[in-house]
Each structure stands twice: as structure tokens, then as C-alpha cells.
Amino acid sequence: MAGIGTKLTKIFEKSTITTYLIGFGYSSMSTVTPMFVIILNILLMGHFLEFSSLGIVERELFSCTVLYIFIFSLLSCAPFNSVLSKYMSDVIYEERYQDIRPCYYLGLLMNLSLSSFIGIPFCLWEHFVGKVDVFYVFTGYCGYIALVLVFYSMIYLSIAKAYQKISLFYTIGMVWAFFFSLFLRFILHWGIRESMLFALMTGFYLIAFLEIAVVKRYFVHNSNRYKSVLRYFKKYWQLVVANFCYILGLYIHNFVFWTTDMRMVLVKTFVCNQPYDMATCLAMFTNISATIIFITRVEMYFHDKYKNYSESVIGGRGADIDIAKSEMFRQLSSELLSLVRIQFIITAVVYLLCVVLLPRFGFSSLTLRIYPCLAAGYFIVFLMYSEIIFLYYFNDLTGATLTSLIFCLVTLIGSIFASRLPELWYGLGVVIGAFSGWTTAYFRLRYMEKHLDAHIFCEGSLLKPGMGTQPPGKIYDRYAQKESGEM
């Protein structure tokens, strides 16, 4: 993320209101633009293609298809993202750029294999049991695979600091999807639902192809070293668990409420809970600015302190190391507190706007009763994720794994309990789960602060490990030496 920090530092140098607005806009463009352009495109397609004229079953089938495409593409990519990011970071640090293409190809094969394993049985069930036509099922499956490619390739562009290219590619893909949907509907006279889904699928593929082209242009050579990538999955298995549990925890409460009496079952295949799912979406949007604020402040302030500490460890005195460590953790605490203060104000303002304005746009009262508790829960979730990122900085994989696992499990149990409470408390499971994860990460960071010297200087071994006969444990026998001296 260092690429954003340099640009933001230059923007904020003048410390004026204009520069702060420009900096906020730049960081927004670099982080959450992809999500917003997809949502905006779907809204525009729905408006111009008169999506509201469809029956409720057709509308909900399209909505559930898009929802499932996003959720399960994220879940299928989650086990690979962190490990591959770690491998790429190490390879770039060691300047072994020829090893990146093997990482890309092998990771792509593993990711597509898992995604197909999940998607094909579901699509077969959708067609044969749900009686959905083959064309629509196949289009949804292709859109799912396309989004898997998009999310997977984003890892490599993020490591290469190509954030602006990512936003640009999403914009190009969604602009294409919008105009192509108009062509399919008004020129070829396709159905509204089919036009929107097919156009969206082609837009995802366009984004994926653009990303793949840039990856291949950045990393030209191929060393064909595939085993080293597999060894990383064995060595850093905790990253697999940590990232997957975090992503699963974001949606596991939805899965719980998909089993309640409020659920809607479409074509004997798709299950959703529209009021709860919509409240979840609103809660995430209410707190999404935390991502922008965190990346902005970490890039501008904490990254330099972390760099100073790393340089002092390599060649500094003991006193310099202690000073750099104190400054780094002091900055860490400052960033977390600043994130809480700023995000709390933003969340409160957005919450009030939603409560006042959303009823005028047709949002149900049930959705707005569920929304407040979920908004509080996602407020804590994004704070927890900030702590997980700091744990990654210190290579505390045990702490990150424990945090994500506790967050996921407590959210699951809490949501099962909350589903039996009044609607106002449906989001209590997310609140309890996020707070449990946040508390775990907090104490892990305090532990790292107290034991960072041992963590940095006492890990690893002086001798390179290898296979062979173990040497004897005794290296000196005082009595044997005494007897040989007397002789």
C-alpha cells in the first residue's frame, strides 16, 4: 500500500479544506470505487431497462443470482488471497520477479478448481430441480467464474500498486455492461432479466481480461518454480484460515437468517432474507469509509514509523531500536483512536440520513428496525479488521488467525441466539462477534508490544536446517579431559 501513501502525503502537504477533500476523493477512488461502479451500473440498467416492470419472482431471481455470485466468489477466493500476497511480497523483496508468473498460474488453477467444485453442483440443482432455463443458469455460472477471475487478479495488481488501474478497469467494464445491456434489450429484443445478467457477465470478463493483460505485462518472465508456491501454503496455513474465517464471518450471520421463517425460497434453489440482507448492505455502506480512513492514515503516518523500526533493527543500536519501537506503537494507538473518533462521527451522520431519507424511497420499516444494530456491528468489524492488518505487519499469524476464528464462531452462535429475539436485536450476533474479535486482536497487539524483541530476534535459527544424522548432544566431557591430562 506504500504507493498510495506517497501520493496522499503530497496532497495533504498544504493542509487546506480543498486538499483534504481531494485526498479523501483520491483514497476513495483507490479503494472502494470498484464496488460503487458495480452498484451504480446495476441501478442504471434497472432504470433504463424498466426492471421494476418485471414480476416479483423474476426480480428476486435476478437479485439472488447477483447476490450469490458476489458472496461465493469472495468465499472461494478467500483461502488463497493472503498466502499468495505474502508470497508475492517476499518474491518482490528478493527481486525474484520471474517467480511471480508461476505463482499466478498455479494460484489461478487452484482457485478455479475450488470455484468450479462449488458452482457446478449448484447450477445443476438450479436447472434440474429449480427448472430454470439453461441459458440463464449458464450465464449466472459464467458471471460467477468471471468475478472469481477479477478478484483473483486484483491481488497481483494490488501488490504492484496499480490501484488506479483497478478502478479504471472496473469503470470500463461497467460502462461496457451498461451500453451492452441496452443493445441486447432494445436492438436484439432480449428479456430484461437476461439482458442485465448477460451484460453484467461480459463486463466482469472484460475487467478480468484487462487485469490479466496488465499482470502479464508487469511480470514477463517465468521461472516455472511451482513447488515453492505450494510450500508457502504449507508454511503459512494460518493465513488461509485467518482470511477465510474473516470473509466467512462477514456473511455467516446472513446464512443463519436464511434458515429462519423470514426466508424466501426461489425456484427451490435460492434462499435469501430480503429485509435482513438489505439491512446488512446498508450497514456495510454506513461504515465503508473506515476502510478509506484506515488506508489513508496508515499510508501517511504508521508506515513510516514501521519502516524506521525495521531499519533500526537491521543496523541500529539497542537504544535506537527501543525508541523506534515506542514511536511505532504510539503511532499505532493514535491511528486506532483516530479511526474510532472519525468513523463514529461519519457513522452517526450517515445513520441519521438513512433513518430520515430511506423510508421515502420505499425501504420497509422491518429493514430499518434491523439496520441500527447491524450498523453498530459493522462499525466494530472494520475496527477489528484494522487490528488484523496491524497483526499482519508484525507477522503475528497466530493472533490474526485467532481473531478471525473467534469473530466467525461467536458471530455464528450469537446470530443463532439473536434470531429468536425481536427484530431490533437481529444484528446482536454481529455486534458480539465483532467485539469478541476486536478484544482478541487488542490483547494480541498488547502482547506483541511487550514481547516484540523476542518475536523479532529469537525467531528462526542460526544454522540452516537440513536432513541428516543428528550430531551427539555432548560436546565436552570434563572428566574425560581430566583423565587424559593425568596420563
Image (cartoon, rainbow, N blue to C red):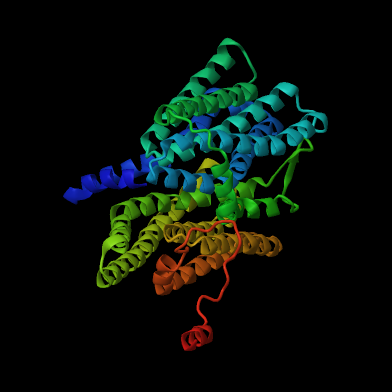
Let me know if residue 2 appears in the view: yes
| Quadrant of the image occupied by residue 135 | top right
Q: Position of residue 81 (x, y in %)?
A: 53, 45
Outermost front residue: 487
334 lies above or below 361: below
In this orientation, which residue lies closer to the viewer: 183 or 52?
183
432 lies above or below 26: below
Let me know if residue 250 appears in the view: no
Q: Position of residue 301 (x, y in %)?
A: 29, 57
Outermost right residue: 129
| Quadrant of the image occupied by residue 327 | bottom left
Q: Is residue 295 left or right of residue 483?
A: left
221 lies above or below 423: above
Q: Position of residue 61 (x, y in %)?
A: 68, 33
Q: Is residue 106 left or right of residue 482?
A: right
Q: Position of residue 382 (x, y in %)?
A: 47, 56
Q: Is residue 305 left or right of residue 44?
A: left
Residue positioned 46% across, 43% down in the render = 88
326 lies above or below 397: below
Residue positioned 69% across, 54% down in the render = 256
In this orientation, which residue lies closer to the viewer: 116 or 236?
236
